Image (cartoon, rainbow, N blue to C red):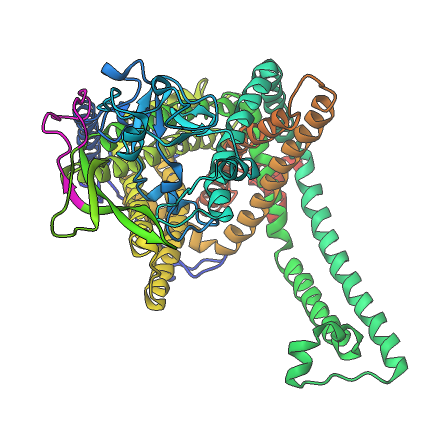
Amino acid sequence: MGCCGGGNETETVEMNKVGDASSENGKYGAKRGHDPSFAGPIKNRSCTDVICCILFVLFTVGMVAVGVIAFMWGDPKKILYPTDSLGNMCGYGNYKSRPNLFFFDLMECVPKNFDPFNPTAVIAQKCPTTQICVSSCPQKNEFYNPITSNKSQMYCKYSADRTQSISTLLSSKQCASYVLSSEALLGRCIPTLIGDKVKDFFNSQGSGLTNNEGKNATQDDIKWATIAQAALENLKNLGERILADVQAVQWWLLAGMGIAMLGCLIYIILMRWLAGILVWLTTYAVLTLIGFGVYYCWTQYKQLAALDNSDLNFSKDQFTTNLSSMKEKKETWMAGGIILACLLLILVLLLLAIRKRIALAVQLIKEGSKAITSMMSTLFFPIIPFILQLILFVWFVVVLLFLATSGKPVFSETTQENVTVNGTSSIKARISSTLCDAVSAINDASQTVSGQVSQYTNASQPNLTISTCSFDKYQTDDNVLRLQVFHIFGWFWLLNFIIAFGQCVLAGAFASWYWAWDKKKDVPTLPLIYSMGRTLRYHTGSLAFGSLIIAIIQIIRVMLEYVEYKLKAGGREPTELQKFFLKCMKCCFWCLEKFMKFLNKNAYIEIAVYGKNFCTSAKNAFFLLMRNIVRVAVLDKVTDFLLFIGKLSVTAAMGVGSFYFFESQTSLNYYLTPIIILVIGTWCVASAFFGVYEMAIDTLFLSFLEDSERHDGTPEKPYYMSPQLLKILGKKNKDDEDEEKA
């Protein structure tokens, strides 16, 4: 059986016209026929989409193989440890005693055209200054003086000949000309001296400090050269304080998460009584607000009309330069009143037309609350998919980290050019794209590099005094890039498979509740466990097929983002035509992903109930929804509204409560820290709980539609829906009607 194989499908797929009514041979076929043997999720079923299952297993094995290759080739230490100009990793190997990276001259790291509002330009640019591994960062501010400075305390290259004089060491660039008081941040020596203090320090020395263009450094150069350092330093202090606050209230945070779970549970239970109140109260509030808008526009119009000196000038200048005067025109209020009145009329007529469908949606939401409270284990089932997703995410990040560090070190040529500015000679640093070999002893970047950086004079360009070959980056080949794409696609596929698994399992449990004639006796003892067993045993291939479709769409969206990134590389701007096509493509695939996720979820419900393959289930679900499109639209909007109100209510309550609790905690550095954590955590918990609720409503809704089409209330074909739903539809089971007459 293939991914779209027909399997053992025997039903005739029939559809009718769009709407709640249906015809025998309509556009979307006919209703499902009555099946006397049907009583909920089919027990006698077979494996579906076997080929997709095999492909999924093979792909999973391939991802494991990619992980093994990544572990063999990669070395995360290349990212965890800073790398000096020779490719040595500070704090590792022979440089274990030198864990920090020191920059000879941070002014050289500032780009020629520095944009303070685009800091990524600094990150993307290679800093040409010499970088060495040091045991500790400088603890004072000092310009090295040939007479007064201590040679042993100077920061120099590994190969520097300290027997030479300080003047020689400084002029030959073997040692840094100055140091600033610094602290280690992520293994980098970041100066703690910022702002005007830096300027005063350089001015006090009378130094001819130059930037990487060979010009005297201005106040703006120094300002923007240190603003990033200040941000990093403040970020470090902020992080330390936040971590201290989290440690101090960690048990309160756990208690808050427990309270959030309890609040979600209580809200779901109360929804069987509050759903109708919330929907109709909000509807009446909206109508009242619009009605008040009509009244207000009318009163303003009457007041301005009484003055009889206002008119509406449709000149161009009136609309472009004097819009504020529009409120003084009676025609403005007349137009506003007419628009609001039309909107009010449309809404009233629409509500009158779909009032029964709104009542039906509210009752299904109440039924969902009953189903969940009768199977409380479904509320905690999302923990299993969450753990699986967490494991998958950790695997994805670790393997991607190893793949990203599987390249070999690449060295580039940095030239230093003699320039003269205002009669002053200085050196201008420039990075060349020319690749070079710094030291022939380098076999790989994890080994210790000995010797000094290759320096030579370029005879063809006499003004280039020194060319330095220094470490640039780790470069990967095309095969590694292909493995990364394979790994990312696999992550999308597995992630969507886990989501599909959770949806199908919950759908099977809730369907067994709906199709039980006696909800107290006929529901299986362990419906969730039975549903999980059926899903894994028979429908792994179908879930893999559905998740594969979503993964393909998502990888295409990633590719579009990558294309846009490449078009903007190097500060370039895409053409207007390129922007237009990219935006259109991204919009189309975003809409396609949303639609396929909606269709897949309903297909999984059909799979859980009938045990058909993915294509057949998706087709049947789509046709069933199209035969009841108005009900679908109403239920979708009402459900979205109530679930949003629920998540917002629980989150807001937790936020307000935690604010009043932690505000009085004087021991905290930032009392907002635990509040923000609790608010975010509560929203995530509420999303998980209400995700189960949403799945319950969707499953019951599809089952309700099937019930309406299969049965007619006669003793041979009785409805399975609750009496409340029957009352809304104006229908009764024949046996119940006879009992009432008796």
Decide which of 6, 446 is in the foreground and name it.
446
The magenta stretch spans residue 679? no
Give the side of residue 16 with respect to residue 537, left or right: right
The magenta stretch spans residue 443? yes
Give the side of residue 716 with respect to residue 112, left or right: right
Q: Is residue 31 above or below residue 85?
A: below
The image quarter containing residue 480 is top left
Q: Which range is magenta?
A: 434-453
What secondary structure is the stretch in magenta mostly built from? loop
The image quarter containing residue 211 is top left
Decide which of 179, 738 is in the foreground and name it.
179
Decide which of 422, 553 is in the foreground and name it.
422
Q: Which residue is depicted at the point 48% across and 50% down?
A: 117
Quadrant location of the C terminus in the rendered image? top right
Q: Which residue is depicted at the point 38% across and 22% down?
A: 530
Residue sitting at the far front: 147
**Where residue 319 sits in the image (x, y, percent)?**
66, 78
**Where residue 455 sits in the image (x, y, percent)?**
17, 36
Q: Which residue is depicted at the point 70% across and 52% down?
A: 283
